[in-house]
Amino acid sequence: MNSRYIVMEAGAKRVGKFGNYIRVAVVELDPSFEGRPTMISEHAKGVKRIVRLWISNTSARRTAARRPARGARQRSCVRD
């Protein structure tokens, strides 16, 4: 039997400094399953396996953009 693959998306808003997150996954379904799984999980009904999973946390990206990279030194501005 042929396997079916679908792309699933899940997201949530968190309170405070934690921000929002989005999960996107490519999921392989059981051939006998009809319909769409309710959650992105290996344990969800009808899910054979999760092929690929991406997680995006908007708060972590904003914090990393404000913070200098590890090992980077601040340069002082010298004027003539």
Image (tube, grey):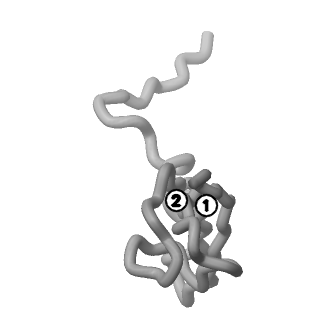
Identify which residue is drawn at 53% across, 54% down: 54
The residue identified by callout 2 is 55
Residue 24, numbered circle = 1
Q: What secondary structure is marked by label 1?
A: strand
Where residue 13 sits, quadrant-wise, is bottom right
Residue 9 location in percent, x, y? 67, 68
Q: What secondary structure is marked by label 2?
A: strand
* Label 2 or label 1, whichever comes before in sequence order: 1
Q: Residue type at mark 2?
A: Ile
User: How many residues crowd mark 2 within 10 Å: few (<14), some (14–19), many (20+)?
Assistant: few
Q: Is residue 72 left or right of residue 76?
A: left
Q: Quadrant of the N terminus?
A: bottom right
- Tell me how far mark 2 sits from mark 1, CA to CA: 7 Å
Give the residue furthest to the front. Answer: 1
Q: Is residue 4 left or right of residue 41?
A: right
Where residue 43 sits, quadrant-wise, is bottom left
